[in-house]
Image (spheres, grey):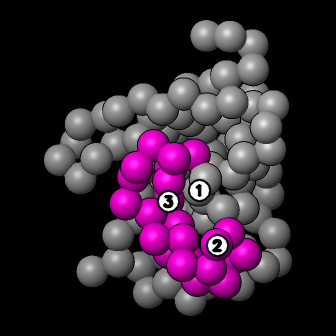
Amino acid sequence: MEDNFIKVYVEQEDGTVNEMDCPTDMGFSLMEMLKAHEYPVLATCGGMALCATCCVDVLEGLDELPEIGDEEYAMLDTLPDLLPNSRLACQLKVDAAMDQLKIKLHHTD
């Protein structure tokens, strides 16, 4: 992979895993990358940490992500089925530290 691209792995509900190539030099959020690759992410608020419809569960690489900010924590705290590894994709800027990150879209039933 080129120096300015990383791979993020997205686990589907049926257990299959797809890889997603993401540029690290364009300032995109993980939410924007998921939408660009046509994953079913609502992102109702457009990435403002106001809706939690871009929530993902981090399966591998959680320790490589930045700390949860106050706005993200407040929004995650509204989810009835919050997991310790849940994050808002809109609050995660794609960078080299995320290479090999594995996530699953968080679905609220």
85 vs 102: above or below: below
- Tag 1: Cα neighbours inside 10 Å, few (<14), some, or many (≥20)? many
Mark 1 — residue? 31
Crowdedness of circle 3 by 10 Å Cα count: few (<14), some, many (20+)?
A: many
Picture quadrant of residue 1:
top right
Could you tell me residue 57's position as x and y percent? Answer: 48, 57
Mark 3 residue type: Val
Q: Quadrant of residue 43?
A: bottom right
Rounded to the nearest whole Å, what is the CA distance between mark 3 and mark 1?
9 Å
Element class at badge 1 = helix
Q: Residue at x 81, y 69 (%)?
A: 69
Which is more N-terminal, label 1 or label 3? 1
How far apart are the alpha carbons under marks 1 and 2? 9 Å
Corner quadrant of residue 97: top right
What is the chief secondary structure element of the magenta stretch? loop
Please name whichever residue, 49 or 100, is drawn nearer the observer in this view of the structure: 49
- Give the residues in magenta: 33-56
User: Which residue is located at x 69 percent, y 30 percent?
Assistant: 23
Work out which quarter of the rendered image holds the C terminus and state it: bottom left
> In terms of secondary structure, where does tag 2 sit?
loop
Circle 2 sits on which residue? Answer: 46
